[in-house]
Image (cartoon, rainbow, N blue to C red):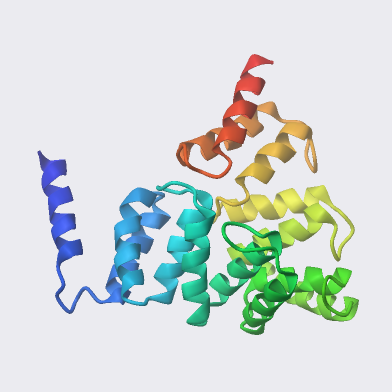
Amino acid sequence: MLLTTRASAQENRLNNNSPEHSEIVLFSEGLKRYKQFNFSAAIPWFKKAAEQGDAKAELYMGILSYYGLGMEQDYVEAAKWFRRSAILGNARAQARLGGMYYSGLGDLLMDWKEALRWYRESARQGDPRGQVRLGCMLFSGEDVVKNVAASMQLFQQVQEKADRGDDEAQYQLGFLYYTGIGFDQNYKAAINWYRKTEAQGNTECLIQLATMCEKGWGTYRNKKEAKKWYEKIISLGPHFLWYDTAEKSLNRLNGD
């Protein structure tokens, strides 16, 4: 009865159109639930804030849609929200939209020139994802004049942010060491950065952590730790992007 009363009170607060329910307050309520990994409860708060034009709420609606957190995984929906937020100038959304153009996800055709445009906008504002993805294109000369010096400068900026504790920078630095773009491939450094960003609540790195522990990349093969990461992925719900992969991998490990 108490839980029902609380849920009803929260619904009334959400549906209340009083001035105190500005997009800032709505976003704050959504973010609080998001950080508690209560994604389905965060959605209505983010959505209402997004409908009022809050760029950060639009970003998070895109993230939830992209990864299938608390809702069906949907690249088309993710692209819609990322675009809205990106147009309003949100650097994180600009990097995300660039990534979707780069891979041609959802209803977006693969378009590296458009990806490059959004990566530049994001990097210009200092977003680590935008800086790394722009740096990768400059490093390899993908649809742009190759410029290794400029790419290394961007990577160095991300390194500095990671050292200061920026969780997105830590993830991106892990990605660079994992792939060996701009740095010597170093799985040990990669897994160390992935562990640091995961400790701050990053869920994007979970599949890398699970895979690396299972295969012994950058660490000794650790079946127990791999199972822990696969279980954490599964705990994020059946719509999560890597749920099926994690479930199959966990079943395989349990059968060994």
Q: Is residue 254 above or below residue 150?
A: above
Q: Residue at x 29, y 67 (%)?
A: 48
**Residue furthest out toward the top:** 255
> Measured from the top left, where is residue 226 in percent x and y?
65, 33
In the drawing, does residue 244 fall left or right of residue 77?
right
The residue nearer to you, when weighing 234 against 220, is 234
Q: Residue at x 73, y 57 (%)?
A: 175
The residue nearer to you, when weighing 101 against 193, is 101
Whether residue 130 is visible: yes
Whether residue 201 is visible: no
Q: Is residue 134 above or below residue 1?
A: below
> Measured from the top left, where is residue 53 in percent x and y?
36, 77
In the drawing, does residue 78 fall left or right of residue 180?
left
> Measured from the top left, where is residue 189 in percent x and y?
78, 53
* Quadrant occupied by the N terminus: top left
* Quadrant occupied by the C terminus: top right
> Measured from the top left, where is residue 191 in percent x and y?
72, 48
When asked about the image quadrant of residue 163, the answer is: bottom right
When asked about the image quadrant of residue 202, the answer is: bottom right
Q: Residue at x 59, y 68 (%)?
A: 97
Q: Residue at x 55, y 45 (%)?
A: 241
Q: How many marks?
A: 0
